[in-house]
């Protein structure tokens, strides 16, 4: 069994997967009046896609504290927001503020963004994750979300979801993020 105690984002990327210039060209916005708003919408759309897929699109660092318990010979720990490849720093808690840093391929293994551990205890794991190059179909999703949010800014999302603005929100099967969703086994 696994009990998560804390999942914290230590650092977020300073570079978004799409530039302000590229999204303004996509949206056919020529003036610079809304540059701040559009930049915020890019970040918001990226974070929304990350939440829907459970995969970090840009380089980020996370820290996870969890406990493994029960009578097993092996635990498979699925780290949140990992892409397929990650290189975690895994520490086993020995006492108050006392940790032992474990050695990869000796004390634990990493396979497909999952950590395989062989001993119960409390673990502190810090790792970097994210795509080196964000897939083009996810870039298109970000462009779609930014454009929709920009064009519908200021409108209220009141009423029933089956009517009005909420129904039009681009969370439909036409977006590509569905095929990038992280599967937890």
Image (cartoon, rainbow, N blue to C red):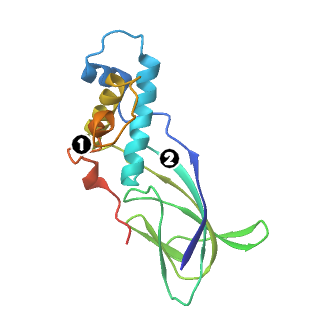
Q: Are marks 1 and 2 in contact (CB under 8 Å)?
A: no
Query: Which mark is in front, 1 or 2?
Result: 1
Residue at 29 percent across and 54 percent down: it is 180
The residue to which callout 2 is attached is 60
Q: Is residue 7 above or below residue 143?
A: below
Q: Which type of secondary structure does the marked residue at label 1 adopt? A: helix
Q: Is residue 165 above or below residue 179?
A: above
Q: Can the viewer see residue 87?
A: yes
- Residue 153 in the image: x percent, y percent? 39, 24
Depth check, front residue: 55 or 165: 165
Q: CA distance from mark 1 to mark 2?
A: 20 Å
Q: Quadrant of residue 113?
A: bottom left
Which label is found at residue 3? none
Q: Is residue 175 left or right of residue 103?
A: left
Q: Residue furthest right?
A: 96
Q: Can the viewer see residue 57?
A: no
Depth check, front residue: 176 or 148: 148
Residue at 47 percent across and 20 percent down: it is 36
Say few, some or many: other residues with alpha carbon within 10 Å of mark 1 (under 14 / 14 to 19 / 20 or more). Answer: some
Q: Is residue 72 above or below residue 91?
A: below
Q: Is residue 174 left or right of residue 12?
A: left
The residue to which callout 1 is attached is 137
Quadrant in which the C terminus is drawn: bottom left
- Residue 66 in the image: x percent, y percent? 60, 69
């Amino acid at each position: 069994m696994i009990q998560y105690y804390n999942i914290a984002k230590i650092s977020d990327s300073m570079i978004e997967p799409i530039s302000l210039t590229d999204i303004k060209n996509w949206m056919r916005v020529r003036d610079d009046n809304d540059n701040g708003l559009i930049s915020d919408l890019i970040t918001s759309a990226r974070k929304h896609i990350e939440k829907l897929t459970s995969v970090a699109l840009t380089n980020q660092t996370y820290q996870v504290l969890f406990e493994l318990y029960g009578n097993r010979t092996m635990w498979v720990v699925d780290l949140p927001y990992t892409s397929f490849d990650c290189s975690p720093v895994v520490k086993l808690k020995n006492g108050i503020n006392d940790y032992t840093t474990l050695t990869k391929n000796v004390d634990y293994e990493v396979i497909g963004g999952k950590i395989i551990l062989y001993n119960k205890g409390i673990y502190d794991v810090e790792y970097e994750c994210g795509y080196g190059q964000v897939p083009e179909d996810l870039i298109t999703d970000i462009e779609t979300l930014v454009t929709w949010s920009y064009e519908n800014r200021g409108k209220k999302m009141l009423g029933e979801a089956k009517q009005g603005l909420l129904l039009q929100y681009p969370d439909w099967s036409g977006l590509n993020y569905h095929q990038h969703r992280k599967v937890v086994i």
